[in-house]
Amino acid sequence: MKLIRDKIKNLGNSIDNAFDNRNTELLRKLIDDASLIVNEGTNTDEQAIVDYFIGNAWSDLDVLNNYGKKTVWSYERIEHINAIKYFRKCVSNINVSEEIKAGIFLQAYTNIGNMFSESGRIIYAIESWEKALSIEPSFGMARCNLCHGLIYYANNLYDSNHKALMLRHCHNELLLFLKQDDIHEKARIAFETDLSRIRRVLNVDFLKKQNSFREYSLGRSQKERNYRKWVLTNSLYLNPLNDIFFDTAIAHDVLQLPNMRVRDYKAPVFHGFFNQLKQEYITARYLYYQYKEELPESVIHYSDKDRKLVNTLDYPQYGFRYEQLKNAFKTLYSILDKVGYFINEYFELGIDRDRVYFRSIWYKDRQINPKIESLNNNPLRGLYFLSKDFYAKDMEYLESVEPDAKDIADLRNSIEHKYFKIHWIKPKESDGELRFDNLAYSIDESDFEKKVYRLLRCAREALIYLSLSIHVEEKKNVKDDGIVMPLQLFDYD
């Protein structure tokens, strides 16, 4: 046992030294050595540490192989993708000690945030930094990296007021947490540069004010207030400010498409398409909430009364409540493919409309489409990295960075086209033929509910990145010559 721990400790020190010496060959060898240590047998704490060290090694290789060498951020940075996979693998280790959570998990969640922020998936990065801060609220590196990422987020927003509020929040947080002793010296220089950039954009008087919002009503009925408060506290409004603020003034789905130049379409088709995507998300969000908060398990919905179902002895969950959860899952998953359809049309990728899928639109001849990569569009890259959390059967040659990606794809296929069961406790084959249904895709209710919630967050991410990616492209067209005829569109409500 002590021998393995010594090997793990030496592994971590060797990775640090190899990075300091810019020795990429040694870093790759140390990654292989880490696998040999795991093969010797490790407990859950040791496994988490090894996964963290492997993540560091891949992250170091990413830095050494890519930084300062290309003007366009490469989508297929294998080292970057592998680093994410191992940091995620680290924090997915269960039954680890409190010591590992307080140390290794704290660092791993911070690194996950850093990796996803750089690759454009800022909303997921915020979640990761917040998980680190839930372990240690005063951890300066997580807090300042969060602000660093929020600055890039703010700079991609089309609403100048939202941008100013987010930047002021970052300014105040950086002033407070840059005093922490745990800030690395090189990082401190970068964070101080962030402060200087904010001060060049916003005047001193504005920065001195605290972010304070008027109190708004969340609705007339208690039922509506409960729902809207739940959306707000879970950061589920289609409003970028809801990623950091939870005041009632933020409680609305304000996200829209930015001002756009439209040349080839007579009707405002993209705005109409975005309306549909928003409405489907909002409805799926309420379906999930209704399952979780408004439809108690113990009460049979009146639509289910006088039904006649056979007891199959394996404790399946039937009823309106569970159909709501399944419908939320189906709607949310379909939003992602529709986002792919939108991207294909707006960015003129030329993919056959009948062959457009969220997971596949990024590729041409099994390589990243050069047109997409050349755009150098950070929110669009965030959509690409979001797509890597999913799986497509006809693209098995591509790796996903989400360990459950194939399970979620199989789950969707079973719900849509096959036989799907939700159970209190999923039966095992050892339970015997009377209880084990080998025709069905079976899942624990709690596991399915978590997957639907994760999908809800992914759909929200996708819609925000979609809007921001279009804003990035439209800004490039501001200096275009030619006559532009304005068309003002009013609110539907």
Image (cartoon, rainbow, N blue to C red):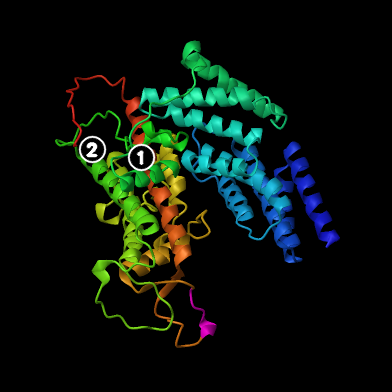
Residue type at tag 2: His
> Residue 470: image x %, image y %?
33, 34
Q: Quadrant of residue 479?
A: top left
Magenta region: 426-431
Determine the image quadrant of residue 250.
top left
Q: x, y percentage for residue 148?
A: 55, 30
Q: Is residue 183 left or right of residue 347?
A: right
* Residue at point 62%, 50% (across, down): 87
Q: Is 44 placed above or below 236 here?
A: below
Residue 361 placement, left or right of 484:
right
Q: CA distance from mark 1 to mark 2?
A: 15 Å
Q: Position of residue 296 (x, y in %)?
A: 37, 62
Q: Which residue is mark 2?
A: 271
Left or right: residue 469 versus residue 188 is left
Residue 349 x, y percent position in the rendering: 31, 44
Q: Which residue is mark 1?
A: 238
Identify the mark nearer the N-term, 1 or 2: 1
Which quadrant of the view contains residue 262? top left
Would you place residue 78 above or below residue 213 in this image?
Answer: below
Disc ID at residue 260: none
Please identify the residue farthest to the bottom as the structure is shown. 433
**Foreground residue, 224 or 284?**
224
- Pick the front one: 83 or 137: 137
Give whichever of 322, 217 is nearer the camera: 217
In this rendering, position of residue 56 left or right of residue 299: right
**In the rendered view, would you say 321 is above or below 137?**
below
- The crowd level at tag 2 (other Cα within 10 Å; few <14, some 14-19, many 20+) is some
Q: Circle 2 sits in a helix, a strand or a loop, which is it? A: helix
Q: Quadrant location of the N terminus?
A: bottom right
**Amino acid type of the residue that numbered disc 1 sits on in the rendered structure:** Leu
